[in-house]
Each structure stands twice: as C-alpha cells, then as structure tokens.
Amino acid sequence: MPEYKAPLRDIKFVTEELLNFSTHYANLPGAEEATPDMIDAILEEGAKFSERVLSPLNRIGDQQGCTFDDGVVTTPDGFKEAYQQYVEGGWPSLAHAEEFGGQGLPESLGMMVTEMVASANWSWSMYPGLSHGAMNTIEIHGTDEQKETYLTKLVSGEWTGTMCLTESHCGTDLGMLKTKAEPNDDGSYSLTGTKIFISAGEHDMAGNIVHIVLARIAGAPEGTKGISLFIVPKFNVDAQGEIADRNGVSCGSIEHKMGIHGNATCVMNFDGAKGYLIGPANKGLNCMFTFMNTARLGTAIQGLVHAEWALQNSVAYAKDRLQMRSLSGAKSPEKSADAIIVHPDVRRMLLTQKAFAEGGRALVHYCSKLVDITKKGSADEKAEADELMSLLTPIAKAFLTETGFESANQGIQVFGGHGYIAEWGMEQNVRDARISMLYEGTTGIQALDLLGRKVLMTQGATLKRFTKIVHKFCKEHKGDKRFKSYISVLDKLNGEWGDLTLKIGMKAIRNKDEVGAASFDYLMFSGYVVLAYFWANMAITAQKKLDEGSDEVGFYTAKLQTATFYYERLLPRARGHVEAMLSGSANLLSMDEENFVIV
C-alpha cells in the first residue's frame, strides 16, 4: 500500500545546512521564538499529523470523491474530522500575525509544514491552502473592519477562504469577465454572475467560506482596468462578527475531473450576493496578485510533493520487486531474481525523481525565505527579495510542476503494469499532479510572464539580480578542483542565460511573436539552470560536512552522487531548449490554420 513519511532529515538539511535558517530567523524581526528547539517540535508534530491522519485519507479521498446534492457538498470520509484536528492543533494560525490571532511565526516555517501536509494528501491540503491567499489579501488590502470581521476567523481556521476568478468564457484573460457588482445604499455591493473551477468553493468542513471575488462595478471601464475585488461570505456576518443569514452565493455543481477527487471544484453562482469592496475600485487585478503569487508558490510546492511521493514509493517498490538478473552478475544469488533497483534504467528513473524532488525542495524553501524578507526585512532587503521573487515565482511554479509530473509518471514506469492499476496509488499521483500545470496560470502563461514581463520589460535587471548571486557563488568556489565539474558548467550556463535573453530581445524588436515562440523553452532552460545552482550548492555543503568528519556518510555521499547525476544526465536537456528557443517563430506560425487537420 502507498504511504508517506515526512522527509525531515532532508528538510532540515535544506533549511539549516544549505539556507542557514537559524541565522535568518535570528536576524528577522519578530522571529525570536523560531528557535531550533521550537522548529524541531513543530516539524515533528507536523510530520505525525501528516503521516498518521492525512496520508491514510489520501486514497479514500480519491475513491469516494466529494458528493453534491442540491447545493450541498459533502467531503470524503474523515476529511471533516481531520480538519477539526488541524484547527485544534493551531496549524492554520502558525505563520500569521498575532494581532489577528496568529502565532506570529515566519512564513517559511509554515511552508515546511505545508510541504508535509500537501505531500500526505494534496486534495485535503487545498481546503486550508486556499485560505492562505484570502488571508494575505485581506491583511494587505482590507480595512480594519474587514480584518476584524473576516481575518480573525480565517486565521483561527473556523472559516476557510477561496479565490473566485475564472468564468466559463475567460480563464487567463480576466479582462473579459462578466460578473457584475451593483452598489447598495449601505456601501456594500450586490454581485451577480457565475464563476467556475473554484477549488474548495463549497464544503462541510468549516462554518463559513469567505470568497474573494473579481467583478466589474456598474459603469467601470472595459477590460482589466475596470475590475474590482470583493469579499463575499457564504453566510452574512452580523455586527458582533457572528454568522447570520445565508448570502446569495451557492454551489451550482461540482466538476467530475481527472484527479484531486477529494477536493470540491465548484461552479459558484452569485445571485445578488452581498459583497464588500476590498482595495480601491477598478484596482482588483493589482490586489489579486497578492494572493496569486502566494498561490503560485503553493502550486510550486505541489510539483515538489508529487515528485517526493513518487520517489518514496518507487524506491520502496524497486527494493522489493524481483525481476531478472543484473547485467553485471547476480546481486542476490540466493533469490529467484535481483531487485529491480539494481538495473540501470530503474536507477535513471529513481535518480530523476530524487534530483527533482530534492532540488525542488531547495528552490521552494529558498523562495519561502524570500517571502519572510518581503514581509519583515528592511526597505532595501524587501526590494531585493521582491525582485528575486518576481523572477523565481514563475520558474518555481512552472518548472517544478512540469518536473513533478514527469517524476509522477516515472513512478508508474518503475511499477510497470502494477503502476497502472489503482491499488498501488501511482496512477492517482499522476492524475492529481496533472492539474498543477494548469491552474494558477498554465506553464505557457508562466513562461510569457517570465520572459516578457519579468525579464524583457525590466531590460534584464530582474534576471541580473539572480545571475549575480550565481556568478558570485561560482567565483567563490572556482578554485576548488573537487567542484570543477559543477562550477565550470554552471558558470558558463549562467553567462549564457543573459546572452540568450539579449538575442531573444533583439528578435522581439522586429517581431513580438518571437517572445511567445521562445518563452516555454526559455523558462525550462531557466529552471534547469536554477536547479543546477542549488545542486552545486548542496554538493559543496555536503562535501564540507564530510570533510568535518560527519558520521552521516551515506546521506551526504548521496547528495554528491545526485548532484553528479543531475549535471550529467538532466542538465544537458538545457541545450535542447537553447536550440529550440533560438529557432524562431516561423516554424510555429507559418502553417495555415486550415492545414492543421485535413480529413
């Protein structure tokens, strides 16, 4: 049976040994209580909850799914009870401000817990996960009254939140939305329209659901410049902050979908629902990106967790499954065959999963460290961290979900025919992973955002912020011959990253389609280079520990070996992306639409 064990040793390696979170917390205002002992205690308890409560519900959620009956959504067996335990344990409030009932701990610590919770049961994790973006949006853009009314209940976990953006005719192009907001005499608004694909839009796990909704106020400009953001609760709230009558928002149906069956994906109908403007009128998209960036980093974690889950279960199976003999001679002559983990092609798949899972973990928690700084650092620190996040968010979201899906598919391949049937859980992992490349902006949209908005529109300044970090790292370690195979390659790719950007930018001056034609390969190239930086860094960190005489020889040696595998087996893929991105737009756009399919 599939299972999940929290990779506490690797989380600690990344956060403590690689990224030095202890020093980070010591210098971060308000993080005084995030001591090593406190962190260890939180991670241990988070691991227990994830392994013992959530992991056993993962398959149940997939098999049962959510049920819909006349607007009422019932979650799978055990989901509601698990959420009650989650709230009683204080987990929703972990990384939120004390003034709103939170524990005031750093966002990055919350991300460590999120990784474990999400790995154990992604569908379940989406219910509290969607609240996170709603909380950030209200905290930053809400009035004091809105914070008092909604934020405190969201932080405690008594209520959950959603974000309602998509409509049937507009997914990425939100400027086309039709949901209307008519002003009421009391300062509220009446919202009318239908939203689709709303994760956790209706369920039985919390007393109220706070929807963050994009709509257009009557008379507002067309397009994206006329969109506003609103708070629309499932139940109206009285002057004392308690639940009152039902609001005019209801679930019209839930989607029957490929994966994440345990999470309700809803069609939400707003029929004169009472809502409250959050942030300035017609500035809804600006406010929206508060929770979109949060959601995109959360989806990057999804790529990581599917790779981690696939790795753990693939390794366990490969050690146990006996098939054929090793080409170099029997490794277990006393058995009828050798375990499949001895075969080179199985090793290729397992090491691919390991490289993407552990490399992805380093990237995700590096980004979470930046989130801490954007919230609590000095003005200069915030500016630098915000610029780095601007570059790395689309890379993390798109690259890690692409490689997470690849790792999940490799899991099926390791299991062979057994991976294709339901009882082993590998096909569920693939189905659950597939959505990650679609929601919160598809891979193609992330690629356009990266190359177009984040790199070219800043004349490469945002890119240079990160490439300077890599350049400094390479310069620092260039003299150590032990790391030449990493540093020389990384240094060359880092320089090439800027050169490629310039070449595409020059092409785009003549033809803007060149940006769209190059963007996917540019993003994937960027992802491979970013992970190369982290793998070189992890290898050097591991070697230092071995030099110090650590008794964890196996753990640190495996880091070095995985880094070598990444550089020699996975990083060469970047070369193909270079050739593709420079091949131009003609090979994509020259064919007439009528000739794509001729019958």
Image (tube, helix red, strand yellow):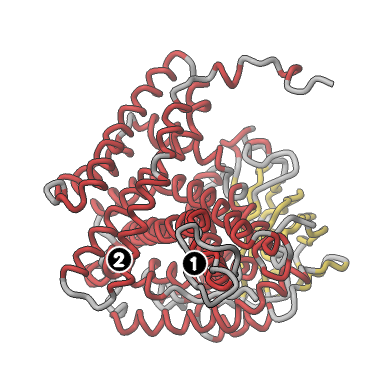
The amino acid pointed to by label 2 is Thr
Query: Are the residues at dot 2 and dot 1 in contact (C-beta closer than 8 Å)?
Result: no
Q: Which residue is mark 1?
A: 330
The picture places residue 342, in percent across and down from the top left corner, at 48, 63
Side (left or right) of 566 relative to 160: left
Task: Answer few, some or many: residues within 10 Å of disc 2's Cα (few below 14, many 20 plus, some between 14 and 19).
Answer: some
From the viewer's perspective, is residue 26 above or below residue 389? Answer: below
Quarter of the picture holding the C terminus: top right
- At numbered mark 1, what does the secondary structure look like: helix, strand or loop? loop
Q: Residue at x 51, y 53 (%)?
A: 345
Q: Which mark is residue 557?
A: 2
Q: Give the camera-side residue of 69 and 595.
A: 595
The amino acid pointed to by label 1 is Ala
Residue 154 seen in this snapshot: no
Alpha-carbon distance for marks 2 and 1?
25 Å
From the viewer's perspective, is residue 516 above or below residue 112? Answer: above
Displayed quadrant of residue 546: bottom left
Quarter of the picture holding the N terminus: bottom right
Task: Answer few, some or many: residues within 10 Å of disc 1's Cα (few below 14, many 20 plus, some between 14 and 19).
Answer: some
Which label's residue is closer to the chain start, 2 or 1? 1
Q: Give the camera-side residue of 358 and 480.
A: 480
The picture places residue 562, in percent across and down from the top left corner, at 37, 58
The picture places residue 236, in percent across and down from the top left corner, at 70, 69
List the single residue furthest toward the right. 70
Count the numbered circles shown: 2
Q: Residue at x 48, y 16 (%)?
A: 511
